[in-house]
Image (cartoon, rainbow, N blue to C red):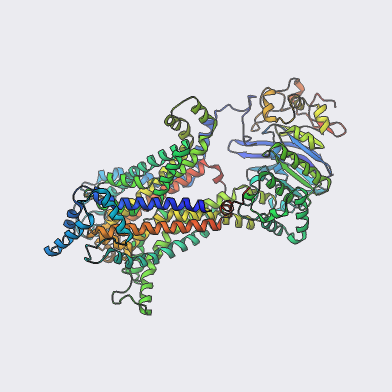
Amino acid sequence: MSNLAGAPGSDGTTDPEPIGERKKSEALYFAKRNPKLLIGAGVVLLFFLIGMIGPLFVDHGPNVYIGPQMQPPSAEYWLGTTTFGQDIWAQFVYGVRSTFLIGFLGGGIAFLIGTAIGFVAGYKGGVVDEILNMLTNVVLVLPALVVLIVAVAYLDVRGLFVQALFIGLTSWPWAARAVRSQALSLATRDYVDLARLSGRRTGKIILTEVAPNMSSYLVMSFILLFGGAVLIAAGLDFIGLGPSDGVSLGLMLQNAFQWSALHLGMWWWFIPPGFGITAIVSSMYILNVGLDEIFNPKLREL
Amino acid sequence: MWRYMGRKLGIYAITFVIAVTINWMIPRFMPGDPVRSMLNRASVSDPEALERMTNYYNEVFGLETPLHQQYFSFWSGLFRGELGISSMQYPEPVLDIILRAVPYTLGLLLPAIILSWILGNHFGAFAARSKGLDNSLLPFSYILTATPYMWLALLMAWAVGVVGGFLPTSGGYSLALMPAFSWEFILSALTHWVLPFLSLFIVALGGWAIGMRNMIIYELEADYSNYLQALGAPRRLIRRYAFRNAMLPQITGLAVQLGTVIAGALLTEIVFNYPGLGSLILRALNNNDYFVLQGTFLFVIIGVLIANFIIDIIYVLVDPRTRVQMTGGAS
Amino acid sequence: MTLRVKDLKVYYQTLRGDVHALDGVNFELADGEIMGLAGESGCGKSTLGKSLIRLDSRMRHVDGTIELDGENVPIADDRGMNRFRYHEISLIPQYAMSALNPTRKIGRMINELLQSRGVKPSEVAEELKRRLELVGLDPDVLNRFPIELSGGMKQRVVMVMATLLNPSVLIADEATSALDVSTQRSVVESMVEFRDRGFVKSMIFVTHDISLVYQMADTVMVMYAGRIAEKAPASTIINSPQHPYTKMLIGALPEVGSTVETRLEGIPGTPPGLLKPPTGCRFKARCPIASEECSQVPPLVEIEPGHWAACWKTGR
């Protein structure tokens, strides 16, 4: 009975739209009516544009001492200045840019490792699965930030890419777990069996048969990893283990804290960077819920 | 049951070995002479002290001996409880410094984790009651989980502490006091505890609420819920079952989220200058005291492993399915 | 007369419009009757089973009435239905294997369900044990968790639980599909025995397995594309079906134990989509004897006592 809903017949009275086409238009229909998706995507896009275009309109570097010191927000300095006379708006737009960068890189690396391990474990099964599962569990138990602190502390030169790499190396396990269980259920389907019987290579089968069938799921995993990477990076920056020569929202928080913006009452120094992180990550998450509701019809109605 | 526990213990043992190995490896495989670079950064001015420290560290690292010997002596030192001597508070043993900080971190973490878990679960179950509640509470929960721990801590310290002036925002107790079992000290410690606790608690709350909400919706869709509805059972009964069943995966979630909450506690401590492991890490970093850093790392790992094991035991006791399977009662 | 369904229309709401899953269903179910409900998947038989006890959120009652023992059954009114559920109309679901709360001991769950339905568990405790023994279960299963029971045992527990309050109508929705053949047989035998002992007055047994229906059912009703094609005593359906669709179904039946699913290839064409169902007789596109009059909807008429068919070609 499950295929009852609107199953088209061959009698010519129902339009012979292909199934994939219909699924797409249905997803689009719900997407346009899903406030979570629209609001989430809107905010993400707004910040993305701030990060991409904003720096083009700032004619000085983010760390240049250009203005008067400790100025509250004004027409000239939209978000005020630091104790040293740095323009906080300039730092903010550059910081948003590097937040997206670390999210894409760190989240991306974690995503690649996690999905690769998850797919291979779920698809291959047996001993390979046992070993990869063990590895996943071990890394899962290790608290990422603490491992990162120790590892990064010994590095003399720290950059955004190294940070992203380290974050990626420590935050993949739950994605691997989730992908594994999904791949496990897909690996037993007929068409995968067929591909396997016809002697195609494992990697090829995973890429062409298994992965496309969970693409929405993969997108959602990536978004969660993105958010996680941004938060961890902010934590590292705040401890003072951020990029040595860059600017990021986490570093702004660290500077504000270190130079006691708190006690000097310079709220314009520490509120914007934290707000930026919260807004970007939470709207990503809410966008994710919207996607989930679209691809998982059960969630549409409570 | 014993097999399951043995398996879990095996994974924890492997994790511990790997963590210790990482700890041992990092200073040795980073470019340069670890002792030299450490002491350079530690910027000790007294030449006599410098020489004493150089000798001491050379001996501890034993860089002349073969690698495997270095590795084994590292382990044997560990089992004797030797984590080295701090360089920033030379010659105090690292172990003592850490043990002094641990109670503060635990005092912050345990109540925050347990209370946020309990409240978050109820909050999430409440949100799953109706579409309207869900649409307003869920985004709110997501905003909470997306909030960097240190930012909420900064906001609270600023709003309640600096602007409002209601509570102290720095330290674990009043500087005028010495740690002692007196009412005065306990009261002071409590007022210093409130803000870090609250800020940690609030951020952690969101995650649990989201988890519970998702689990309970899943349970309300489950076959047994459908069947009870078909037999006319009231919503109250069905919700009670769903809540209870949704609670079980949330216990496992506790183990998974532990790392994040610990990270949050460390960051929160830094903001409030709370004398726990977080502030210790920051101090060690600023003074390049790698022994303290590595010792803290080991302590956190051990704590996480113990907590994981406790959660495993609780899960087995609470979920009749695993319990039954383990006692071999299944047909 | 136990159950009388008149012109029942239940639609599924989808984005692309209503799916006419039940489009004017008429039938009667007598006291003590076990009726097999058969048809290809998608014909509306499960929808009919659900409609009698609880509409899910996508289902909408459009038209028609249901009467049980002379009383109107308000299927569109979720609250009003509660009075009937379990007490008068009960269900053995398709998913009987997972119908029990996995974290409650079975006895405790049954007691909590009874209490919530205004029945004192102590009043039926003895009867519960007696019936469990009747289906070959040790009453000790009440102290166990569902996971400790085999599939067949769970099935029987659900059966005893569903019929504990002696309902007028029991709907068994593909209740035996998940079981192996020998367990299937014993469950089916217990069902007949429950009817004989008066634990349930009458029963609707939804299945795609006609041979199973033949073993236990008094009557068989065949559905096609949201409507009744034919209803008659089981032996009549098997030996002298009148509706061309039933004829093809039975004619394509190779041997005992086969199912509609495997036989489908024997009938050319597929059932029409129910989103925009064809006008007139819905079977006409596949029917070998269709003619002009089939562009009108054939009424369900009693062609001989106890034998109804909806076809212009059957005797009227």
Q: Where A134 falls versus C239 (above or below)?
A: below
Left or right relative to B97: residue B220? right
Q: Nearer the viewer, residue C276 or C40?
A: C40
Left or right relative to B239: residue C240? right
Q: Where A85 falls versus B191 (above or below)?
A: above
What's the residue at 69%, 55% (across, down)?
C142
Q: Nearer the viewer, residue B258 or B222?
A: B258
Any part of residue B230 in sight: yes
Q: Position of residue B269 (x, y in %)?
A: 33, 63
Q: Where B104 falls versus A17 (above or below)?
A: below
Left or right relative to C21: residue B85? left
Q: Nearer the viewer, residue C208 or B178?
A: B178
Q: Position of residue B249 (x, y in %)?
A: 52, 53
- Callout count: 0
Q: Position of residue A155 (x, y in %)?
A: 24, 50
Any part of residue A246 in sight: no
Q: Position of residue A31 (x, y in %)?
A: 49, 41
Residue furthest right as drawn: C305
Q: Nearer the viewer, residue C27 or B46?
A: B46
